[in-house]
Image (cartoon, rainbow, N blue to C red):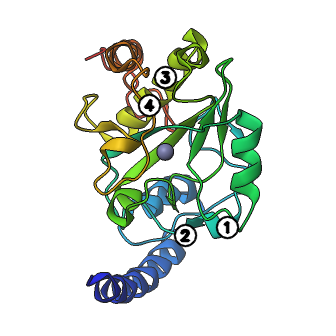
Amino acid sequence: MGDGDHTARRNIGRRAVLIGGTVAVAAAGLAAHDQLERWWWRLPGQEKPRRPGEVDYREAQWSAASGANWRRADRPDDYVIDRVVIHVVQGSYATALRVFRNPAHGAASHYVVRKDGHVAQTVRELDVAFHAGNREYNERSIGIEHEGFVDRPQDFTAAMYQSSAELTADICARYGIPADRTHIIGHIEVPGADHTDPGPYWDWDRYLDLVKQALSRNPGKGKDPGKDAGKAPA
Ligand SMILES: [Zn+2]
C-alpha cells in the first residue's frame, strides 16, 4: 500500500547522505573519531553499524532468530517505534527460541522473557520482527514474548513481571514511548490480530505499575547511560 514508493524515496535519500557523510568523516580526521561516530549514527537514513551478538538491552542474552523471521530495517530512523507489544508463547522459553531459529516459522519477537526473569534478545530493535501479524504494527513496535500459556496464570511469575517491566521501561525510556495502555498493548489489541495473547490473566495494572516504577527509578537506563546522566528522575 504505497510502501514500495516510500522505500524507493528513502533509498535515494540514504545514498545522498552516505556520500556527504563520507566526505565529512575524511575531512575531520582521527582525533574527533569517537564524537563523529556518534554523530554518524544519528544521521537520518544512515544505516547503523552492527556487531555480532550485540544486544539493545544490556540485561539480555543474544540468541539469534532466523533471518527469515524478521526484516532488516534501520529503526527508529526509517520507522518510528511507538508501541511495545506483549505476547505469551503458548509454550516454553526454549520452544520460543527454537521456533524463532526455524526459518519456516515465519515469526519472531525481539525478546523472550523466561519465568525466572531471564531475558533473551532474538531480533535487533533496528529490525522489523514478524510478531504482531500486522505489517504497520510490526514496523512501529517491539515485541516481547513471555514463557507460558494464556490460560495458566501461575505461569506469569513475579520474576517475569518484574523483569519484563524493566525491559519495557528501558524501551520506553530509549524511544520516548509513554508508559500507558495506548502504547503498551497486548497482541490481541493489534488491529486484525487473530491471536488472543497475553490473555485474561495477564495483570495489566500490575505490569504498568511495575513499568512506571522502573522508569522512575532509572529514567535514562538504556544503551547510552551517559545520555541522561545527572537528570533527576521524572
Ligand atoms: Zn502473540
The residue at 41%/16% (across/down) is: 214
Viewer-proximal residue among 31 and 190: 190
Q: Amino acid at mark 1?
A: Gly
Q: Which residue is mark 3?
A: 166
Q: Sequence-wise, which precedes: disc 1 or disc 2? A: 1
Taking the image as shown, residue 94 lies to the left or right of residue 226, namely right
The residue indicated by pointer 4 is 168
- Residue type at mark 2? Arg
Asked if the residue at tag 4 contacts the one at tag 3, i.e. Cβ–Cβ closer than 8 Å, the answer is: yes
Image x and y of residue 155, in percent: 60, 19
Ligand 1 within 8 Å of disc 4? The answer is: no
Q: Residue 67 has which mark?
A: 1
Above or below: residue 33 compared with residue 57:
below
Q: Which image quarter: residue 52?
A: bottom right
Q: Amino acid at mark 3?
A: Glu
Residue at the image position 43 percent from the left and 54 percent from the top: 132
Query: Callout 4: few (<14), some (14-19), or many (20+) C-alpha neighbours within 10 Å?
Result: many
Q: Residues within 10 Å of mark 1 (few under 14, many from 20)?
A: some
For the N terminus, the quadrant is bottom left
Residue 104: x percent and y percent?
Answer: 70, 68
Nearer-the-camera pick, 55 or 111: 111
Q: Secondary structure at mark 2?
A: loop
* Contact? badges 1 and 2 (CB < 8 Å): yes
Query: x, y (%) of residue 213?
Result: 37, 12
* Three-letter code for the amino acid on which mark 4 is drawn: Thr
